[in-house]
Image (tube, grey):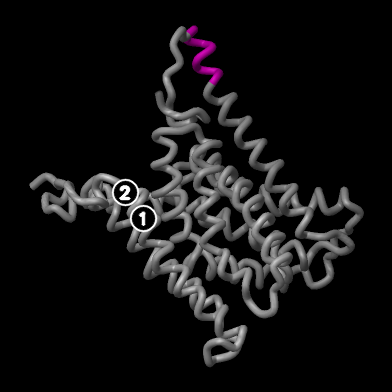
């Protein structure tokens, strides 16, 4: 029997079917912000528990709010086969040489930028650093980053690209992507100034991250690849991560974002050249958007 969209008033004719993105955002923020507020209130002494593990709450939001909301809205608006297709993209692993780019481009570029900023590479204890980084990356991707990107890249950003260009879709996606983390800026004794500065940094980083994910998703078509990429960036940027363990005398929080911009520009340039060569050979007079086009569909 062919798969069909839900026929009840809560499916095809329901709000989720008619306004899938609005329904998704209502569900996500209506549930996630209260959940993430629990460790914030506890850290300020307004709830018992003291310093609760924020990571567990973030994990719960990913597994029990973000992913179910994306799958349910997809099924309600496009049918259960579309929800299965979304999950299938999370396990697309045959990428050939692109895996080398996903795994090595950001760390290598971060190292080069760190050296240019006056830092130096250390080989002392390199193997333990690489081992810890590899194990941490696998755990982070399996538990959270793969499913984060299934939602943000596979569901929201992909839908937005049906109507907008890649940069515009990335910019729009960056707003809820950053906003979801806002409650965590209130942890402890953060002042208003701390929150404002943190929110601005969060939004800028979110825009850059969504552009990076957008071009890599165009290049690979794999949510697994961009989930791994998300984890690799965190390993380059976070204190105690890969770059922090191998670079001395350079701030990885500066080197990694610069590397992110460089890698994004390089992959975007590759996609544009890859798209323009066949068009030049065929002497096309009317541009037809395809899977590598950085513009939106017409």
The residue tagged 1 is 24
Q: Give the image quarter of residue 182.
A: bottom right
Secondary structure mostly seen in magenta is helix
Residue 182 is covered by the magenta coloring: no
* Dot 1 alpha-carbon crowd within 10 angstroms: few under 14, some 14 to 19, many 20 or more: many
Which image quarter is the C terminus in? Answer: top left
- Judge by depth and name the residue closer to the eye, 186 or 278: 186
Observer-nearest residue: 217 or 92? Answer: 217
Against 70, is 57 above or below? below
Callout 1 secondary element? helix
**Image position of 83 with respect to 247: above or below:** above
The residue to which callout 2 is attached is: 20
Look at the image and say whether residue 279 sits in the magenta stretch.
Answer: yes
Residue 35 falls left or right of residue 256: left
Image disc number at residue 40 = none
Residue at the (34%, 50%) spot, across then down: 86
Q: Position of residue 75 (x, y in %)?
A: 24, 52
Crowd tier of the residue under label 2, counting other residues whose Cα lies within 10 Å: few below 14, some 14–19, many 20 or above: many
Which quadrant holds residue 123?
Answer: bottom right
Label 2 and label 1: CA atoms lie apart by: 6 Å
- Residue at image point 62% right, 67% down: 134
Q: Furthest residue to the front?
A: 192
In this view, the residue in front, 90 or 20, is: 20
Report if the CB atoms under discs 2 and 1 are less than 8 Å apart: yes
Looking at the image, residue 268 lies above or below residue 61: above
Q: Position of residue 127 (x, y in %)?
A: 73, 70
Q: Which residues are magenta?
A: 276-283
Give the SS element for disc 2: helix
Q: x and y percent of residue 13 in the render?
A: 17, 47
Q: Residue furthest bottom?
A: 48
Q: Position of residue 62 (x, y in %)?
A: 44, 66
Residue beneath the point at 42% across and 48% down: 156
């Amino acid at each position: 029997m062919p798969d069909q969209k839900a026929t009840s008033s809560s499916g095809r004719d329901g709000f989720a079917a008619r306004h899938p993105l609005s329904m998704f955002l209502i569900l996500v923020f209506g549930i996630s912000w209260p959940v993430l507020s629990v460790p914030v209130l506890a850290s300020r002494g307004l709830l018992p528990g003291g310093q609760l593990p924020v990571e567990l709450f973030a994990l719960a939001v990913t597994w029990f709010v973000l992913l179910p909301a994306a799958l349910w809205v997809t099924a309600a608006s496009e049918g259960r086969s579309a929800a299965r297709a979304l999950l299938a993209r999370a396990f697309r692993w045959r990428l050939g040489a692109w895996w080398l780019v996903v795994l090595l481009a950001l760390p290598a570029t971060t190292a080069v930028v760190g050296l240019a900023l006056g830092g130096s590479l250390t080989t002392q204890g390199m193997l333990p650093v690489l081992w810890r980084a590899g194990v941490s990356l696998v755990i982070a991707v399996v538990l959270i980053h793969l499913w984060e990107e299934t939602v943000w890249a596979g569901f929201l950003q992909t839908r937005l690209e049906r109507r907008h260009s890649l940069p515009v879709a990335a910019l729009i996606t960056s707003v809820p992507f950053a906003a979801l983390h806002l409650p965590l800026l209130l942890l402890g004794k953060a002042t208003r100034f701390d929150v404002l500065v943190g929110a601005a940094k969060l939004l800028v980083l979110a825009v850059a991250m969504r552009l990076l994910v957008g071009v890599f998703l165009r290049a690979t078509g794999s949510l697994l690849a961009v989930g791994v990429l998300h984890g690799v960036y965190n390993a380059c940027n976070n204190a105690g991560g890969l770059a922090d363990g191998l670079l001395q005398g350079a701030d990885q929080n500066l080197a990694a974002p610069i590397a992110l911009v460089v890698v994004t520009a390089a992959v975007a340039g590759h996609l544009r050249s890859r798209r323009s060569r066949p068009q030049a050979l065929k002497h096309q007079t009317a541009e037809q958007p395809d899977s590598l086009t950085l513009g939106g569909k017409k």
